[in-house]
Amino acid sequence: MAGVRNTVAGSLKARHLMEVFEIHMSAHAGLPRLTSRFLTAAGRDRQRTLLGKALLFPDQASWSDAEIVRGDRSQHQVGSAFRCLKSPHHVSLRPQRHGTDPKDRVQVFACV
């Protein structure tokens, strides 16, 4: 029961999730039983007041509003690419301790 309780608490740790979900935990035949309910009114309130709102301060004065929003929404692609570069299971650029630029370039070329 304690492990399930900790897992649920970890899952609901994100901002405002505890306020929009009602969780009940009980034991049945020695096993944990978990029931949950989405609190619709609280969810609507969070959606109206908090969720999905962001202020964007672009440094590209020539971009249109659509380009700014598109650029903001595509940030995850850059983060995903960096995660792939750092992943030892995909393309690994580590360890890079050659000490000279030409050797570092050779390693990057070989890895990518």
Image (cartoon, rainbow, N blue to C red):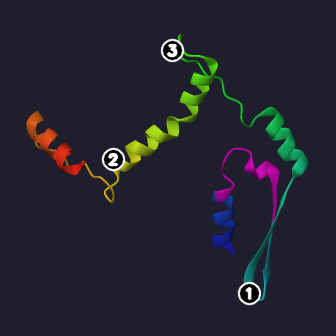
Location of the N terminus by quadrant is bottom right
Q: Nearer the viewer, residue 41 or 74?
A: 74
Q: Residues within 10 Å of mark 3 (few under 14, many from 20)?
A: few
**Label at residue 102:** none
**Circle 3 or circle 2, nearest the eye:** 3
Q: What residue occupies the far bottom of the structure in this picture?
A: 29
The numbered mark, 1 or 3, whose residue comes first in the sequence reads 1
> Residue 3: percent from the left, percent from the top?
63, 71
**Circle 1 or circle 3, nearest the eye:** 3
Q: Amino acid at mark 3?
A: Gln
Q: Which residue is mark 1?
A: 30
Q: Residues within 10 Å of mark 1 (few under 14, many from 20)?
A: few
Determine whether the residue tagged by mark 3 lies in a helix, strand or loop.
loop
Q: Amino acid at mark 2?
A: Leu
Q: Which residue is mark 2?
A: 85
> Residue 107: percent from the left, percent from the top?
16, 46
Q: CA distance from mark 3 to mark 2?
A: 27 Å
Q: Amino acid at mark 1?
A: Gly
Q: Are marks 2 and 1 in contact (CB under 8 Å)?
A: no
- Establish if 60 lies above or below 36: above
Determine whether the residue tagged by mark 2 lies in a helix, strand or loop.
helix
Q: Is residue 76 left or right of residue 52?
A: left
Q: Which residue is mark 3?
A: 60
- Establish if 52 lies above or below 18: above
Write the start and end of the magenta stretch as one range.
Answer: 11-23
Residue 36, by quadrant, is bottom right
Q: CA distance from mark 2 to mark 1?
A: 46 Å
Q: Nearer the viewer, residue 91 or 98?
A: 91
At horizontal 74% and vertical 45% (from top left) the residue drawn is 16
- Establish if 84 lies above or below 3: above
Q: Is residue 3 left or right of residue 95?
A: right
Q: Is residue 14 magenta?
A: yes
